[in-house]
Amino acid sequence: MYEYFDKLPKIAGEEMPNQDFFNKLNRPQKVFYCMLVFNGDVDNGGVNQFFFNKPEFAFAVLETFEELKLPKLKNDYEKCLNELMGNADSYGKRKQIFNDENKSWEKRWKAFTDGYAEIKSAEKLEDYYYDKEFKKEYYKHVVEYIDKNIDKFTEK
């Protein structure tokens, strides 16, 4: 899956920013891409890392979990999203500090890691998200979704 994630924009024939590329995808392709975006960051650093790195996909991921028929994941993720929205000012300040290359790496890193405390619901989601049995069920839903929409994955 990640092989495609890295290569999809190039396959489209252009070097495009993620959002431009994403806007050209059809709905099933967007669902698959959102799943990859979410997995890539959450598997590496948790929900906080996903929100920090890819906030532009935050609401699309919520729709993705709905479309994949994953109600527990959708509900738990929605709680995380609500906490993010409730801390939007803090998030903006932390993001500004992190992106300020004039600040020390320690200060920038602290701005990032402070976000973990602001999204407490992420702990519940992450408690099962990394579990092998959950992943099997999760990927089963993804495969079923792709199979059901296979004709949409060959469209340009």
Image (cartoon, grey):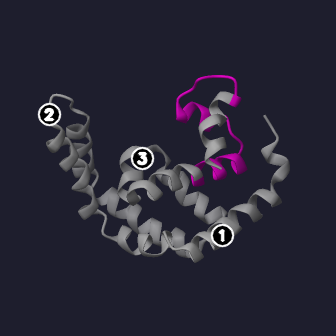
- For label 3, the crowd category at 10 Å Cα-Cα, with few meaning under 14, some 14 to 19 and many 20 or more, is some
Which is in the foreground here, disc 1 or disc 2? 2
Q: Tell me how far mark 2 sits from mark 3, CA to CA.
A: 23 Å
Task: Pick the residue in front: 36 or 95.
Answer: 36
User: Which structural element holds mark 1?
Assistant: loop
- Residue 13 point in image, percent of width and height: 69, 23
> Residue at (66%, 51%) from the top-left corner?
32
Q: Is residue 139 above or below residue 45?
A: below
Q: Amino acid at mark 2?
A: Lys
Q: Which residue is mark 1?
A: 69
Q: Is residue 50 above or below residue 97?
A: below
**Quarter assignment of residue 44:** bottom left
- Residue 75 point in image, percent of width and height: 49, 72
Give the overall secondary structure of the magenta segment: helix
- For label 2, the crowd category at 10 Å Cα-Cα, with few meaning under 14, some 14 to 19 and many 20 or more, is few
96 on left or right of 79: left
Q: Which residue is mark 2?
A: 103
Q: Amino acid at mark 3?
A: Pro
34 is within the stretch colored magenta: yes
Task: Pick the residue in front: 62 or 49.
Answer: 49
The magenta segment: 11-35
Q: Which residue is mark 3?
A: 55
Q: Which mark is residue 1?
A: none
Marked residue nearer the N-terminal end (1 or 2): 1
